[in-house]
Image: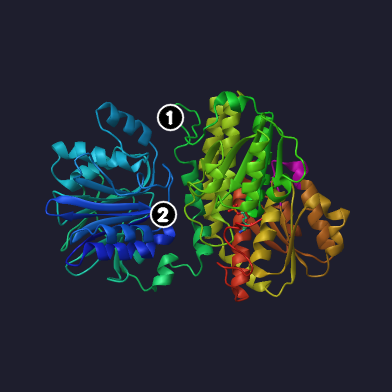
Amino acid sequence: MCGIVGYVGERSALDVVMGGLRRLEYRGYDSGGVALINDGKITSAKKAGKLVNLDKELQAHPLPLSHTGIGHTRWATHGAPNDRNAHPHLDADGRIAVVHNGIIENFAELRAKLEAAGHEMLSDTDTETVAHLLHDELLHTPDLSDAVRAVCLQLEGAFTLVIADANHPDVVVGARRNSPLVVGRGKGENFLGSDVSAFIDYTRDAIELGQDQVVTITPEDIVVTDFHGNQVETRDYHVDWDVSAAEKGGYDWFMLKEIAEQPQAVADTLLGRYSAEGSLQLDEMRLSDEELREVDKIIVIACGTAMYAGLVAKYAIEHWTRIPCEVELASEFRYRDPIIDRSTLVVAISQSGETMDTLMAVRYAREQHARVLSICNTNGSTIPRESDAVIYTHAGPEVAVASTKGFLSQIVACYLLGLYLAQVRGMKYGDEIARIMTQLEQLPEAIQRMLDEGEHVRELARELSASKSILFLGRHAGYPVALEGALKLKELAYIHAEGFAAGELKHGPIALIEDGLPVFVVVPPKGRDQLRDKVVSNIQEVRARGALTIVLAEDDDEEVAKYADRLIRLPKVPTLFQPLVATVPLQIFACEFAAELGHDVDQPRNLAKSVTVE
Ligand code: AGP
């Protein structure tokens, strides 16, 4: 997720673009850059790191006054977060400047064709291919908007593109597919932005661009077409958010926004991982297939929610690869004298990539000659840099301390690793992998349904907000869901919340059950009858002792309904994937519960987003 701004009008384009980028910096802060049009040429500046670095660059090397410009704050997906990979990217003649948000799924193939035709790429990004494609298109399509439309038809994946062309000094063109772009309508000026916070200081009249649309803005005009040039009707709306709400996309909390972004985060993490030839490709995998075939044990190390993601993934990884997979708290791992060697694959899961407990465990594992693969959401952070290989999740920046989209995308990345291991070790045929990938690609829709049905969960949270203790039960892949649900609630609501393996109840925890005690229970899919029946028995056990049972169960599981004081319906998904839908109502519950108590949902007491101390 990156921040994008475009401007044409009478003001200083640099002032407008930089101001917009500062509003958008929460969307990405790996690098920043601007491109302006002056006297028939592009002038630009870009720097790795936060925008303050770009500010310093611009103070040291001022750009001439311009009234047309574009800008970008980057959240790196393809290519490390450095100056070279910072946007904007230019074509070889320095005439076209492009900024981009998203993932161009077929960029490797496009890049290969461009390089074969003599184009020299200066960066590792997928974005740069667009600048070179536009260069070639403009050789025979003089109109910039036509050229942008022709190039968009060649791209696959998710993209928001904003383009400036030195030969069209008072025009900026934008295009979008599966990634947001809004238009700000001014008087004698017009704006483009990733969201309205980019231009809310200048206008509150906006147009949401639709799927597969191209917008051309000049100081006086806004024209929107589809990718084939057919003009389309637009819907203007007035933004009544304040700036802070705009940065949260209109949500009260970043956490709510990030919960809502989960379908896209899962879809983006899956994007570009499965080739047309029917094989998995993890482009950041720097361990050879031979090395992966030598792996005889996997140890997942992580903390908190990331560790629970590993616990969920363990079931799939062992089922698909038959490699023993242990999941350990990073803070415990290196003190127990673990049995690891060259054949051990240590998988470090970390959203921030800076958690010191996990980093120290990675360093220990490497000292013991284990191979280390990290699953991380922050490109270029310390843990991936110190790993042998990395699979980046593409969830975009996660601002709220309580991890949500990070969790779901970590699970999906672990599934990709398990499938990749199964593929290189011959445990799964291509058609089996294709079937599983198809099931995974259907999950965003199932997750979206849980979001759409969230209101009754919020009502439940308000109803139970006086509770001082809440338990969570689950079995198999539902057990880590119970742990995660409890962690969300305790870190946000500051009450006693505890997750248990449902089978453990009778070994002690059932003593906690008392009249009216809320107990969430995640019921396995009906396809797992024996497992499911045991959980239904557990529900009866706690209910018989007075618990208020809040049951999460599949749509068509009618039998369990009679034991549920409150029922949260789940879409039917394969057992191994149920955590991705069952977790969502627990996130919503914890968020609403904390808000009802008047807590700061995004910044819970005593906690930090990244724990960089041991
Ligand atoms: C999750 O809601 C917490 N914020 C915390 O448990 C977090 O998951 C843990 O600190 C690990 O962080 P990381 O993924 O950045 O390594």
Indicate the quadrant where residue 347 lies. top right
Task: Look at 53% across and 39% down and name the residue there.
Answer: 390
As drawn, 295 above or below 238: above
Magenta span: predominant SS is loop
Q: Nearer the viewer, residue 165 or 464?
A: 165
Amino acid residing under circle 2: Gly
Q: Residues within 10 Å of mark 1 (few under 14, many from 20)?
A: few
Residue 428 visible to an observer of this rendering: no
Q: Is residue 218 magenta?
A: no
Q: Disc 1 versus disc 2: distance between alpha carbons?
A: 35 Å
As drawn, 169 above or below 310: below
Task: Look at 55% across and 53% down and name the residue there.
Answer: 352
Q: Which mark is residue 276?
A: 1
Indicate the quadrant where residue 197 lies. bottom left
The answer to whether 194 appears left or right of 581 in the picture is left
As drawn, 351 above or below 246: above
Q: How many marks?
A: 2
Q: Nearer the viewer, mark 1 or mark 2?
A: 2
Amino acid residing under circle 1: Ala
Q: Is residue 527 magenta?
A: yes
Residue 485 visible to an observer of this rendering: yes
Indicate the quadrant where residue 458 lies. bottom right
Task: Look at 60% across and 60% down and name the residue there.
Answer: 587
Could you say whether the residue bearing mark 2 is in a helix, strand or loop?
loop
Q: Which residues are magenta?
A: 523-532
The residue wearing badge 2 is 49
Q: Position of residue 337 (x, y in %)?
A: 77, 40
First reached walking from the N terminus: tag 1 or tag 2: 2
Q: Quadrant of ligand 1?
A: bottom right
